[in-house]
Image: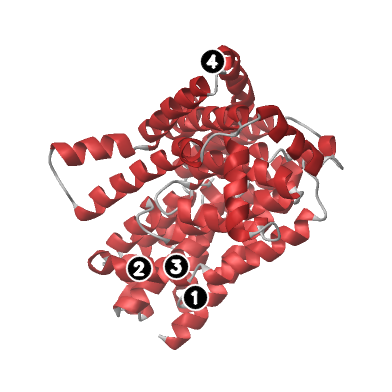
């Protein structure tokens, strides 16, 4: 099956998967794997190759994010165990005040995601989110949506995140990367506002599992927790397991952008990979655990962390299988071959193309890089030749690449599971939020395109 029938089959498959998960209560892992297998058969992938495609999608997800999730979750567990997460929450509140926790966590995520992948960033910052929920009594769902929103916007807009920097290079904007960064910051304004507003609205309608079990005891629970720890860790000790990995990843990005070479560059590149950066953070977290006199909890903490992240990893890997099936089918080639139909749409063309690819195969980075490759030779036809115009094309691709995040996106499962929400609640929060901020971003980009 190819062409339009394949796209129709994909849409039907996604609808069936959503029904299986949300209405029939079939476990997401089984639902996604079953739909992936069915779609692979319908797409005409040779039967002898299907097992290899499924295996590659499953293992590829573990390769890219599996260890990162485990290490990040362990760091978060240590921060909670030692009281460091509560200390960080107090530090944030002292800066922004108790009335603006949603804005605080959104901006925190936005800054962190500039050098760090949004998946890793959510895992790293989730302990602070949870502590802020207890500290302020704010909706856990609203805080989850705000954190996800801030991380996602920077992830698709602002170099040195791999997606936008690759798009800038492909479209010929590599020589004026600072302009692309500045445009990314500018184009973040409206989606950040839209995401914040939606988070506050949906936070009043949906309750996460932690809110349902702890309803009515938020402030008391926070104060009791502080009393249990006695003296909380110092500010530097509390933030080191989080900030050091972020700094290492940022240094690695700077080395890549500057095209530095040599032993020192290789060393920073090595330490700046998400796995190694979080490994350093894990070592610092272990030191914090021993310093707090809780070394006896080391083994149990590790064991509980592995039990917690296990379901997340397997569902995330299943989403990777679905994405691999799509990329192995003829769908992407069909969209590429018929891209000329969308050219009349101007600045909306790269947005729609990226949105189609994002929704189809799940990865924002793949959607960005693929769309950039398709759009690059069409820039003169579309009338985008000036540096500012090309930078806006990069932004339009980024806006499309976050529209929308659903079951075939690993980030969807990271946010849903760490936010303690059911899959159907994930569609109403994460999926709908990415649709809203994607449209909001495109509105701002369209206005800027009229000006420039």
Residue 151 drawn above or below residue 310: below
Q: CA distance from mark 1 to mark 3?
A: 12 Å
Q: Earlier in the sequence, mark 3 or mark 2?
A: 2
Task: Say which of 364 and 373 sits in front.
Answer: 364
Q: CA distance from mark 3 to mark 2?
A: 9 Å
Marks 3, 2: nearer the viewer: 3
Residue 257 drawn above or below residue 196: above
Residue 374 drawn above or below residue 293: below
Q: Residues within 10 Å of mark 3 (few under 14, many from 20)?
A: some
- Reading the image, the residue beneath label 2 is 180
Choose top left, top right, bottom left or bottom right for residue 25: top right
**Picture residue at 45% right of the left edge, 81% below the top:** 449
- Reading the image, the residue beneath label 4 is 295
- Reading the image, the residue beneath label 1 is 445
**Which part of the image, by quadrant, shows the N terminus?**
top right
Q: Secondary structure at mark 3?
A: helix
- Reading the image, the residue beneath label 3 is 185
Q: Earlier in the sequence, mark 1 or mark 4?
A: 4
């Amino acid at each position: 099956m190819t062409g339009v029938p394949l796209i129709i089959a994909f849409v039907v498959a996604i609808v069936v998967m959503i029904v299986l998960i949300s209405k029939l209560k079939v476990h997401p892992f089984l639902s996604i794997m079953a739909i992936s297998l069915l779609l692979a058969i319908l797409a005409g992938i040779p039967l002898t190759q299907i097992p290899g495609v499924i295996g590659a999608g499953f293992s590829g997800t573990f390769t890219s994010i599996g260890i990162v999730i485990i290490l990040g979750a362990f760091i978060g567990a240590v921060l909670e165990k030692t009281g460091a997460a509560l200390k960080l929450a107090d530090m944030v509140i002292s800066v922004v005040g108790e009335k603006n926790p949603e804005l605080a966590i959104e901006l925190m995520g936005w800054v962190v995601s500039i050098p760090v992948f949004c998946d890793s960033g959510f895992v790293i910052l989730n302990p602070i989110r949870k502590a802020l929920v207890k500290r302020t009594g704010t909706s856990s769902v609203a805080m989850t949506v705000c954190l996800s929103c801030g991380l996602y916007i920077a992830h698709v807009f602002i170099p040195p995140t791999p997606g936008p920097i690759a798009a800038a290079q492909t479209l010929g904007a590599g020589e004026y990367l600072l302009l692309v960064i500045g445009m990314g910051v500018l184009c973040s304004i409206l989606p950040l506002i839209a995401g914040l507003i939606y988070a506050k609205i949906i936070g009043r309608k949906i309750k996460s599992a932690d809110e349902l079990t702890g309803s009515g005891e938020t402030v008391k629970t926070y104060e009791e927790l502080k009393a249990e720890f006695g003296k909380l860790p110092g500010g530097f000790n509390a933030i080191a397991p989080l900030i050091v990995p972020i700094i290492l990843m940022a240094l690695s990005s700077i080395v890549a952008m500057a095209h530095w070479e040599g032993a020192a560059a290789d060393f920073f590149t090595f330490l700046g990979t998400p796995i190694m950066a979080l490994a350093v953070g894990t070592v610092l977290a272990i030191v914090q655990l021993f310093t707090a006199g809780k070394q006896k909890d080391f083994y149990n903490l590790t064991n509980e962390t592995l039990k917690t992240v296990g379901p997340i990893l397997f569902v995330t890997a299943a989403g990777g299988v679905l994405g691999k099936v799509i990329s192995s089918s003829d769908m992407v080639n069909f969209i590429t071959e018929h891209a000329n139909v969308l050219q009349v749409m101007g600045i909306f063309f790269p947005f729609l193309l990226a949105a189609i690819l994002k929704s189809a195969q799940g990865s924002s980075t793949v959607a960005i890089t693929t769309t950039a490759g398709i759009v690059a030779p069409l820039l003169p036809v579309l009338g985008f030749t000036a540096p500012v115009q090309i930078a806006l094309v990069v932004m339009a691709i980024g806006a499309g690449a976050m529209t929308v995040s659903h079951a075939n996106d690993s980030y969807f499962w990271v946010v849903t599971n760490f936010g303690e929400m059911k899959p159907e609640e994930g569609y109403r929060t994460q999926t709908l939020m990415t649709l809203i901020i994607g449209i909001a971003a495109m509105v701002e980009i369209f206005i800027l395109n009229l000006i420039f």
